[in-house]
Structures are given as C-alpha cells and as structure tokens.
Amino acid sequence: MKLEVATRRIKTFGERFGEAHLYLAYHAAFPLALTPDLLYRMWANFQRDINGEALNIPWMAVADLLLSSLCDEVGHELYEMDTVVRSALLKELKGNSRFGDKRINKLSDFLLVYVQQQLDSHDPDIRDFAQVQRWTALAYTRPSEVAQEIASVLAGLKLQDKTEWVRMASVVETFAESLAEFQPLLIYARGKDRFTHADLEGAVAQLSNLTQQGQQVEIPGIWLNKPKLPLLEAERIAQYWLKRLDIECPEQSFANRESIVKWLVGSDLDRFEVLNSKELEIAKQAMEYRYKILRQRYLGFARVRAYRNLITRLGSLVTLRHKIQTWVALSRDRQRTVLDVLQEVIQELLQSDSYIQQQMISISELTTDDRLKNALLFASTEEYCLRPVRNQPLLAYRFVNFLRRTQRGGLTQVPTQDLVRLVSEEILTDDSDNRINLVDTQAVAEYQEAIEIEEQQALGKTVQQEFEDYLYENLGEEAIDWLRLYLQGKPQDEIAKKLNQPLKEVFRLREKISYHAVRVFALKGKPELVDSWLSISLKEHNLGLTPKQWQQLHEQLTPMQCQVLELRKAGYSIEDTASALKLEMHQAMGEWTKVYLLAQALRSQD
C-alpha cells in the first residue's frame, strides 16, 4: 500500500469517529496482530496518557476500529493492519507529546505479560504466534535481544525447512525498521529465503552484501553459516567464454569481451537452470553458431565493410535471389538489382521488426563502443534472417510481407474456399529449372487466427455448459433460464417478463448468479477452465493484467497477499500455500480471493 493511501485512510477514520478513536488506533498499531480480546484489554489498560489525563476512548471504539479500513480480517477473530498503515500510526504514537517513548515502553511491558501464557501453549501455531508478538514487544525497547533470538532460531533451521524459512523471512521483514542497525541479519534472512526458493541469482546478490569473510556471519553473539552456493550454469558458461575470448580475441578490450559474453549468454540466466543435458547442449551450439557469425564477418570490421558483409551473405541465399529476380522481372522498375531490393527489405526489418528492435535496446545496454554495437547488431540480424521456417530462411517470408506492403505483389493467390492450401506455392523464373516458393504468410496467419477463434468459441461453450450445471445444482433451473436470456443480450425488464417474475426478484437473482460466478465458480469450481477461456491465468497471463496493472496490483497488496500471490504463481495449490504460510485453508482462500478480485477490478478499469 502506498503511504498516501494509508494516510488518507487514517485521516478518514479520524474524521468519522474523532480523536479518541485515533488514540486507540495508535495503540493498536503496536502489536503485530490483533484479536478482540487483546484490543479490549488495551482499551481498558490505556485510558490515560503519560501525564495522567483521561483519553475518553469509548468502548465501541474497539469494534469500530476492527471493522474499519485500517484493519483486515486474516482469520477467525484475527486482524492485521497493513505494514504502511501500522508504521504511520506508530510514528504518530511516538511523535505525540501525550504518548512518546514512555508509552512505547508501557505497551511493550503490557504485551509481554499478555503473551506469556501463550508461549507455553501445547499448540505449536499459538506458540509461534505468541513468540512473534513477544519479539514485537521487545523490538522497540530491546532490539539487540530480539536480533539475537531470531539469529538463534535461524541458526537452528535446516535448509530443507522451506516453510519455516518463508515464515522467518516474513517475520524479519516485519521488524526491518526496528532492527535497522542489524543489517547482516536482514541480509542473511533474505538471502537464505531466496536460496530455499531456488532463486540462486537472488541469493548470491543478497549474500554478497555481507562484509564478513569466510563461511560464517556473526550476528549479536550468534554465528550463522553461509549457505554453500553452487555455481550457476550461466556463470560456468560465461567463465568458459571469457577464457576463450581472452585467447581468440586479445585485440578486444576486457570490457568488450565481457559485452560479447553477455550478448552470447543472453539476459535470461535462469533458463539454463531448467534445461536438461540435451537442451543445454543445443543452447551451447546456438552460442557457438552466433559467435562464428560474429567472428567471421563483423567483429573488428568497420561499419561500412561489416554492412557490406551482411548484404553479401544474405544476398547469397539462392531461394531469396530467385524470389527477388522474379519480382523485379514482373515489376515496372526492371533496372533494380537484387542487392537494391534486399537492402530495402533489411532496412524495413531493422526499423519495424520487434525482435530486432529489442536486440538493439539490449545491445545498447551491453556496450558504449559504436563499432562493437554495429558488429553485434549485424550478427544478430544475420542469425535472425537465416532462421529456418518451413525449410526456408525467415528472410524469404519477410520479403513476401515486403511485397504485400509495397503492393507490387500479385505473385500469390489464395483460393476463397481454402485459406491455407494455396493454388500453388511455387512460381517459375525465367530459368524454368529453378522454381521458387512464395507461400502467402498472411493467409496462413489468417487461417491460424480463425482456428484460435473457433477454439475460443468452443471453450466458451464448455464454460457455459459447466456453469449451467453448477447453477442447476445450486440455484435451480430458473438461474439457467436467466443466464441464457442474459447471454442473448436481453435487458432485465424483458428477462422479468420472460420468466414471469417481478423485476425486483430478477435483480436479486442476477446478484446471486454474479456472486456464484465470481466468488465460487471462477475461484473454487472451475478456475483453470475459466482462466484459460478468458486468458487470465496467473502463470501464463499474470491474471490478464498489463505490466503496468501488474505493478499497480503489487502496490495495493498487503505483505501476506504478496506472499500468497508469489506462491500461487510458483504453482502452489491453495492447500500448499496455506501450509507454507502457516494459515488455515479458509484464511489462505480468503487472501487469494482478495487478490483475485483486486486483479479483476484493475482489468475492469480498461
């Protein structure tokens, strides 16, 4: 949550209920979580300020606060404040002359007494929760003691205790402000959390910030072992290429050699970790192929010479030469040469192709050396143009698209009855022994689009049938009749006449069906089917959100909801998510529902 949103909520709460209610909210922000019992006890114990003056907080303030927008219900009679809201209220508590650090100390003593009995509970969940509340009480008054106890718990954890690492990392992040002087502890917890999630790159980035040498880190009297991080496959490949370039390209500066290695390996380093041995070998062969292109025709050459090498190499493609010769022969301008036309096609490719545009951006981030930039771009362009598509180089299809856009074509014909099977995929040149292929890629694209539309319609009918079966079981046949009329575009008054029901009852039926559609069927009944139909799956489509909306979603989520979203995106089921975060099933489902509905609201803004 953004600070301005939190500030607005606090201001609205104060304007609605008054200053006395705000005083209770200040105090309620001290514990990490609230229960009605805890808040009532706080209300009873803190009716006066540090000067002994009455605060006049009414008993109804407890219910008003718990049910306000300042608190979120995360379980049965268990409430939490958003981290930003909590921090803002605590800042007000400490800055108010009626409370200050003295009241913080009193709240600490009160919370320590309150959780003491729960620390001895037979229920491990209650015991863990009480321990976190105890750390909350001590964090502002005795931070070194809290840091030492947390470090002691971390030292006792095994690498296999993934759920416990997730929980402890969340706890440490909660105390990040009060434990700011213990940066090694924060860095260590974040690094180990990423390590247990197989995010080796993130773990290396975090743990490399620890200044201690060797395999141990000292945190207030506790020695923690650094995890032994295996070398990433991408790092091994990069080291191999650096050594090889050092031998084969000594004339290039070290910075240039590093840039070439980054270009060869690519930006997505994680992809190497999921490849099997055969796929990894193919990836290495692809790098060899790119390097061979770069070294033979572009590296170390002046821009004009390198560009001439590119045109000469692409112009040597027999298939493409025949296509261009045929087109020139059929066009009005017969004085143009193959290389003239080829240069036009290449220039259009450089200016409009999304892949080449992305390569330009990436290369500009890799190096500031203009000659190397040109060499890498020309090598990328050659490799891209020569990629085989249906046994022909991709550039051949780009030429056909060029013909279509310049409207000089007419070389292909598409039968009206069949968009894919062309009358002829070949055309004769002046030399009758040489046939060239001019597949109409636009026709293929239109056919594939038509197939996708048909599949989408079929999937939509499947969803409708499944939802009708669900409605029949839960709301009866009348709900199905309403749905069918609604999908035909009928207004509610006309639906009411068709169903012979009062308009008020039809509106009520609509609300019931909407609730079941969004809250039950789409979330619990057939989520995979609905997500696939609407293209809003979490893994493939980020809930159907644009990158900007995805960022907005993260900004509006609570820390708990962010963890739920992260685990669900990683493939965890609701049951596994609940287990990992030490939540009840209904709590995890509740948090996921909030995330899903918030994403739906963001999609609806478009």
Image (tube, helix red, strand yellow):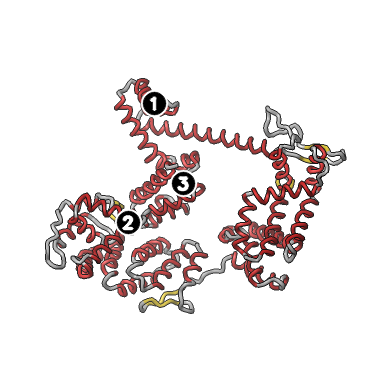
Tell me which label, 2 or 3, sits earlier in the chain.
2
Looking at the picture, does residue 360 appear above or below residue 341? Answer: below
Q: Give the residue at mark 2.
A: 82
Tell me which label, 2 or 1, sits earlier in the chain.
2
Q: Nearer the viewer, residue 67 or 355?
A: 355
Judge left or right: residue 449 versus residue 344: left
Q: Which mark is residue 424?
A: none
Please, what is the three-letter code of the amino acid marked with disc 3? Leu
Question: Would residue 123 be seen by someone viewing this image from the given angle?
Answer: no
Where residue 6 appears, as percent x and y from the top left, is: 32, 55
Where residue 80 appears, as percent x and y from the top left, is: 29, 56
Looking at the picture, does residue 74 appear above or below residue 48? Answer: above
Q: Nearer the viewer, residue 31 or 112?
A: 31
Helix, strand or loop under label 3: helix
Judge left or right: residue 16 versus residue 384: left
Looking at the picture, does residue 318 appear above or below residue 512? Answer: below
Rendered image quadrant of residue 414: top right
Tell me which label, 1 or 3, sits earlier in the chain.
1
* Callout 3 crowding tier (Cα within 10 Å): few <14, some 14–19, many ≥20: many
3D distance between C-alphas at marks 1 and 3: 30 Å
Q: Nearer the viewer, residue 547 or 71?
A: 547
3D distance between C-alphas at marks 2 and 3: 23 Å
Q: Give the residue at mark 1.
A: 491
Please, what is the three-letter code of the amino acid marked with disc 2? Asp
Q: Give the residue at mark 3.
A: 543
Judge left or right: residue 261 versus residue 136: right
